[in-house]
Image (cartoon, rainbow, N blue to C red):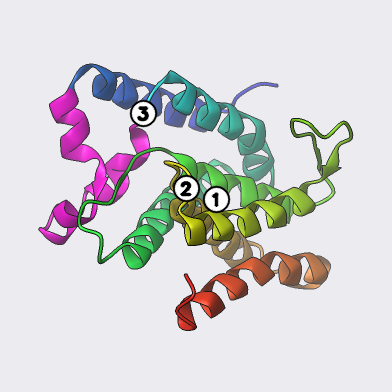
Amino acid sequence: MNMHIATIVIIAINVLVSLKGFNDFSFFERYKFNISAIKAGQKERMFTSGFLHVDFSHLFFNMFTLYFFANVVIAWLGAPIFILIYVVSLGAGSLLAQFFHKNEPQYSAVGASGAVTGILYAAILLQPEMQLGIMFIPIPLPAYVIGIAYLLYSIYGMKNRLGNIGHTAHFGGAMGGYVMTLLFMPSLLVSQTLMVILMAVPIVILFGLEKMGKI
């Protein structure tokens, strides 16, 4: 599968910034997502953190996922909108993390997961008939099934603080990809009405739980 130049540029920026972070602790600390630093005025961390990664496996997993789904979004919407969705999803992931962790001054996070999840959800909305294979399940599953299950798992992870994973940023990124895709292709509301509704269910659940103080 040939990579579009837009995908190559995004991957290259992630690799270069991450390598700098691997080798320069002060750089990593200065640009990671951190609630207290953002509240102190360093708003750029909401975007710079999305190009830093903890280690090579973290970087590889995010870029590998981007590689698989970028072409779907570019084919349907074009490279400029693909880049816009990527950036908006990154920002949406950071905004949701800030909202849910606003009273945790030490909360920190890094990674392109929010942006990449936004691209993943855009691709699923645009091409819900895609079949995706995941580890430990021998048969491919429809992309939308995996997408919805992943968001529900993210809610569970947020509620139970599972692992050192930015579940909130994943969810925020997915919301960004969902909204931006519908904004640029509103015809999906008619052609994929059921899919649009199904993929909104986890979002409604999340904010319902937040309203009830259960997350």
Instruction: Describe residue 91's horizontal placement relative to residue 125 as left or right.
Output: left
Query: Does the rendering let one see residue 130?
Result: yes
Nearest to the observer: residue 74 or residue 192: 192
Instruction: State the mark number for residue 114.
Output: 2
Numbered disc 2: secondary structure? helix
Kind of residue sitting beneath label 1: Gly
| Residue name at image x 61 percent, y 37 percent | 70
Numbered disc 1: secondary structure? helix
Task: Examine the rendered structure and indicate whether residue 115 appears above or below residue 70.
Answer: below
Q: Position of residue 85 (x, y in %)?
A: 50, 51
Instruction: Describe residue 196's horizontal placement relative to residue 70 as left or right.
Output: right
How far is mark 3 from mark 1, CA to CA? 20 Å
Query: Does the rendering let one see residue 83?
Result: no
| Residue name at image x 52 percent, y 28 percent | 63
Tell me the mark number nearer the camera, choosing from 3 and 1: 3
Is tag 3's residue or tag 2's residue first in the polypeptide sequence? 3
Which range is magenta?
25-52
Numbered disc 3: secondary structure? loop
The residue under label 3 is 54
The residue under label 1 is 118
| Residue name at image x 56 percent, y 60 percent | 155
